[in-house]
Amino acid sequence: MARSLSTPVRAQASLGMHSSTTMTRRVLIGHVRGMGASTPLGFAARPFVGSCTTLQGRHGYHTSVAVCSAVEEETFTYQAEVDRLMDMIVNSLYSNREVFLRELVSNASDALDKIRLLALQDPSQYDSGSELGIRIKADKDARTIVIEDSGVGMSKDELLSSLGTIARSGTAKFMEAMKEGDANLIGQFGVGFYSAFLVADKVTVQTKSNDDPKQWCWESTAGSHSYTIKEDVNDIARGTRITLHLKEDAADIADAAKLSSLIKQYSEFISFPINLWTTKQNSKEVVDEDATKKKQEEADEAAKKEGKDSADPVDPVMKTEWETSEDWEIQNDNKPLWTRPPRDVSKEEYASFFKSTFREFIDPLDQIHFNVEGTIEFSSLLFIPGMAPFDQQEAMQKSKNIRLYVKRVFISDEFDEDLMPRYLSFVKGVVDSADLPLNVSREILQESRVVRAIKRQLVKRTLDAITAMAEKSKEEGTKDDTYITFWEAFGRNIKLGVLEDEGNRQVLAKLLRFSSNLSGAGYTSLEEYVSGKKEGQESIYYLAADSKDAAQASPYVEQLASKGFEVLYLTEPIDEIAMANLGEFEGMPLVDVTKEDLSLGETDEDKKALEEKASELKPLTDFMKTLLGDKIEKVTITNRLTDTPAVVVASKFGWSANMERIMKAQALGDSQAADYMKGRRILEINPKHSIIKNLANEVSKKNEEAIKDQISLLYDTALLTGGYPIESTKAFADRIYSIMSSEKDSSSEPIDPEIV
């Protein structure tokens, strides 16, 4: 079951162990019935003597819970302190003890791979059996699990060398290697094998190699400082049988259903068949003699009443009986799609795999199937789901969408952030690498050069697929709305990527879609915006608002819309932050239309006319600034408005009104930072509006006292239409009531009654 070493060495020479021959003969109780010449998997078996339990299956095959035969026994003492080393293995490498099955099955697969390779060079290797596979059998009463393979097996020297890995490496050396990130020791049978002691207090290994005429038995107990090796009576043609004597608290693992679940979780795609001894309840229909007899009697009685001697024979009454049967059942008949060439896999097969593996009920929008060869080798099959999870934020935090395999052995689905960036957490799939160790942990992943290379490839291939999807939707004459479906489900993820992935920011920018004043019911991309820009336009304009309707009604876009400029509507909380981080696209800066110094492509004449208006209205703007005080930094003249008299804008580096609302809604927001980031507010007035003209006229008449409430009301209204909160709602209401009252008083003059 282990990898045999190319140059076996004697135990005393290579390991420096102390050995002693006990020469003790044990009294054996019981015997084992002779086994058939072949098994369902073609493993030859011969009778052996020993105290063990035999469990008979079909074709006379016996799976044995073995006690090694009573022959000369050698005891070997470990050089290193095994208790300490095992404690490190259990606590550092294996947080989940159920991985013992993954390790042992993986070792069995390695042994089968090796005999297959040897047989390619020397076909006589198959003289001891040509069918390759793994068998697992549990005995709940005896509290044992037997795992057997028909792999290469081990000679005595190989057994000493392979199972001496821990002792040979030494505790200090092993721990030093682990600190340096060299976790490949797990791939050597010694360390992986010792995971068996996570669940077993005693382990027996019986093994037979083609290179050794004798069968050998290795045995040790948990916490022991020594193990024994002895010659065994040959009952294995070739391969290795491991018997685990389970601890009391691990007795629940000796259950076929539990083992089946673990095999399907960790080893479903092992290339060799894994057969599990299972018990089934089978139904069959049999004749219910009593019910049939009663039915016949009732029929005869009815016939006699009709004057007949007897009735015709009735149809027998059937009943269902259940019988128990035991047999081998293959556990890994699903073949991994990612190992097949993409051209050989149908769309239906991809969809079926996606739904069954990830518990989805809608076909994926697309799949990404590729193999990487070179300095690193891995295969991957990724899917873009057809819909977003119902709670997308929680799903992003607890994502288990990437299943990591090492040589088809399932390792974990908890390494998403190490294999995919957070913004691509919606992508589901599998990654199968031959360059990672089986005991890969988060710390190893974070430091692994191989993992970094895998992550780069996964991100690149995923973005290439999404880009191709977007390009296809823009082709003339096509009605492919796949990308629109993707965008509406995962658009927020792409915007998050613009924030977090600086290296791919420009690629992600091309995937962004927004509504605009010119897009109608659809979306526009930044590329489409640039290609359709007005002559002389130097900026990309955007407006953040709660909804598309609110953006369309905003005073900030009045002049832009009248001149035919396109304005992107940012209606999600993340949009404005993403745009601020993007900064520019294809050389055009992204400009928030709610900020000061908005350029509308004015000519020199326009600028000169605006300066003249500012000079003309300076008495009004000065008075308004004096009246409003620290509420605003200044009052200026603007040409951004057409129908609105005034609007409040933010300073270039402060928060917009939309961002203020978002940040105030944060549960753990910093109020001091919020006050600082609010920036300065500037009141811009429309010199062409009648209200502004009337106010300017009153100022010129030195009638400032009469317009104070009007100016305050104008400011509050500008705050409201700009999306800012009013500082004093009561004062605002009082001004409204005052205006309503004055209008009522002015209209309450007596009217002469009409004489009819």
Image (cartoon, rainbow, N blue to C red):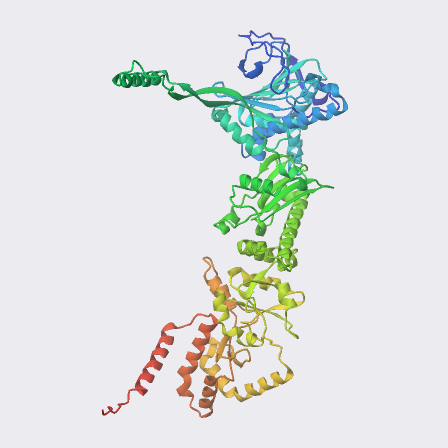
Residue 442 in sight here: no
Q: Residue furthest left?
A: 756
Q: Looking at the image, which is closer to me, 166 or 469?
A: 469
Q: Identify the residue shown where x is 66% and y is 52%.
A: 464
Give residue 513's quadrant in the image: bottom right
Q: Is residue 626 above or below residue 649?
A: below
Relative to 741, is 293 above or below?
above
* Horizontal side, residue 740 vs residue 27: left or right: left
Q: Nearer the viewer, residue 751 or 429?
A: 751
User: Residue 707, percent across and down?
Assistant: 41, 85
Of the 4 image quadrants, the one containing the C terminus is bottom left
The one of 396 and 287 positioned closer to us in this rendering: 287
Give the total of numbered labels.
0
Task: Please tell me in which quadrant of the rendered image residue 120 appears.
Answer: top right
User: Vertically, is 160 above or below 358?
Assistant: above
Q: Is residue 302 visible?
A: yes
Horizontal and vertical percent position of residue 720 = 44, 72
Which residue of the protein is positioned furthest toward the front in this rendering? 307
Q: Position of residue 748 (x, y in %)?
A: 28, 87
Expressed as whole percent of the image width and height from the top left, the position of residue 656 reads: 52, 68
* Quadrant placement of the N terminus: top right
* On screen, residue 520 above or below 172: below
Judged from this view, the residue extending furthest toward the right is 121
